[in-house]
Amino acid sequence: MAFAIRRDVEVPGEERRYLPEAKAMRRAIAAARDGIGQGESPFGACIVLEGEVIGTAHNCVWGSTDITRHAEIVAISEACKRLSRIHLSGAVLYATCEPCPMCYAASHWADIERIVFGAEISDAARFGFRELSIPNLTMKELGGSGIEIIPGFLRDECLALFEEWAQRPDRKTY
């Protein structure tokens, strides 16, 4: 599915900046909701390149019994297979929650240009997930990564996923 992505915008007196696309984040939210319905955890991701969605996924940890099957990893894998390459230069990763260190590293190695996320690692921890509390901005700085990070996008909608998930009697954390 393709849609118009608002690219860098110039505002007089300000540096050029990227305006995230709500449609892409809402696809990630929809994927997370689908995963919640399948007994998975409340995380979703969507990858966009040049206005086209090239990967969308929810966490698949429980169904696959593979702790590495986070939404971002599954979406990166899907995008790489779709394009028949391992580098996704110019792509934007939309994640309903701030990527964990594993997912951030995979984004770095895949040459993702930008990560846009809603909820933060600390929000996941509040709901019982054993997250490593290393924010993406810290990983970017310490690792010298060139990924642009845009936090807090559609945060309330992304936080609502945790609330929905928390109401389920079959919810599980890792």
Image (cartoon, rainbow, N blue to C red):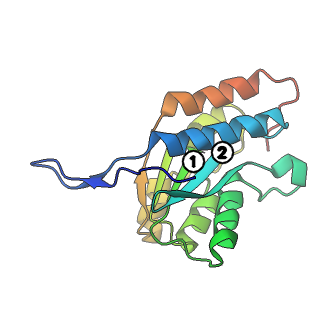
Q: Are circles 1 and 2 on residues that touch, CB within 8 Å? A: yes
Q: Nearer the viewer, residue 28 or 167?
A: 28
* Residue at (50, 41) in percent of width and height: 23
* Residue at (9, 49) in percent of width and height: 13
At which x and y percent is residue 65? 90, 54
User: Is residue 25 positioned above or below 53 on the image?
Assistant: above
At which x and y percent is residue 39? 85, 36
Local crowd size for mark 1, using a 10 Å CA cut-off: few (<14), some (14–19), many (≥20): many
User: Is residue 22 positioned above or below 91 on the image?
Assistant: above
Alpha carbon distance from label 1 to label 2: 6 Å
Q: Nearer the viewer, residue 127 or 108?
A: 108
Say the numbered circle drawn on residue 95.
1
| Three-letter amino acid code at the position of disc 2 | Gly
What secondary structure is marked by label 2? strand
Q: Is residue 8 left or right of residue 140?
A: left
The reply to whether residue 97 is visible in this rendering is: no
The residue labelled by disc 2 is 44
* Residue at (88, 54) in percent of width and height: 64
The mark that comes first in sequence, 1 or 2, is: 2
